[in-house]
Image (tube, rainbow, N blue to C red):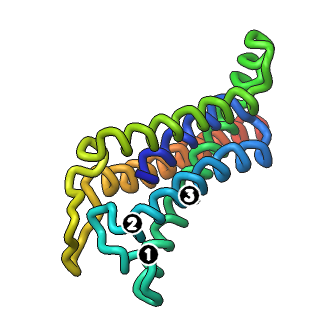
Amino acid sequence: MTGMVGIFLGLVTGCLVADRRRATLVVVAPFLAILTLQTAGIAAGDAVSPPSTVTAWPGAVPYYVVQAVILTSALGIALQLGTLRARGAARVAPRLRVSGTTLAAVINATVCAAVVAGEELDRSSFDPGSVAHHTSSGSPPAFGVAGIALSVVLCAGLGCASLRRQHVRRDTNAV
C-alpha cells in the first residue's frame, strides 16, 4: 500500500508545492500515517505477511528499510517534480485562491483517507492475498511490489530529466 500511496503523494506534492521544506512536510506526514496503519495491520495479523515481519527484531529490519526506500522515492519524486515544474506550481495557486501547499495537503490527506477506507471496506481489492493463518514465507502482495518498483523507476526518470535540464541550462549559460 505504501508504494502506490508514496507515488501519489510525490506526484501531487511535486505538481503543487515548489518549496522544498513544505513539500517534505506534505509528503512525510500522510506517508507516516499510512505506514503506521499498515504496520499496525501487519502486526495484528491482518495482512499477507506474518506479524513477525514488523515485530521480530532483527528480522523486521528489511521491512523498515523498504519503507525508508519508498519514502525516499516519494520525496525524490516530489522534490524533483517541484523543481521541474516550479513555474507551473506558482501559477496554479493564485487561480485557486489557496496556497499550493494547502491544496496538496488536502488532496494527499483525502487520498490517504480514501485508501484506508477502501482497504477496510474491500480488503480483497487492496490485499488479495489476505489470510487468517500465515506461513513463515509470507510475501508482499503484487500491488505493493509494483508500487515500490514504479516509485523507484519514476524517481530515477525524474532524476534523469532534472540532470538533463541542468545540463542544458549550463550549456545555454556557457554560450
The amino acid beneath tag 2 is Ile
Answer few, some or many: residues within 10 Å of disc 1's Cα (few below 14, many 20 plus, some between 14 and 19).
Answer: many
Name the residue rendered at 51%, 49% in the picture.
155
For marks 2 and 3, the one nearer the N-term is 2
x, y percentage for residue 78? 62, 43
Asked whether 40 or 88 is in front, the reply is 40
Please state the horizontal and vertical placement of residue 102, each as a whole percent of the image: 75, 30
Occupied quadrant, residue 134: bottom left
Disc 3 to disc 1, C-alpha distance? 17 Å
Task: Looking at the picture, tell me which residue is in the foreground, 172 or 36.
Answer: 36
**Left or right of residue 96, residue 109 in this image:** left
Residue 76 x/y as whole percent: 60, 51
Nearest-to-viewer mark from 3 and 1: 1
In which quadrant of the rendered image does the C terminus lie?
top right
Numbered marks: total: 3
**Could you tell me if the residues under marks 2 and 1 are in contact, i.e. CB atoms within 8 Å?**
yes
Q: Gap between marks 2 and 3, in whole Å?
A: 18 Å
Mark 2 secondary-structure assignment: helix
| Amino acid carrying mark 3 in the image | Leu
* Residue situated in front as seen by the camera: 19 or 118: 118
Say which element carries label 1: helix
Residue located beneath label 3 in the image: 71
Packing grade of label 2 (10 A; few <14, some 14-19, many >=20) is some
> Label 2, on which residue?
42
Vertical order, 152 against 110 (above or below): below
Can you name the residue that lies furthest to the bottom here? 58
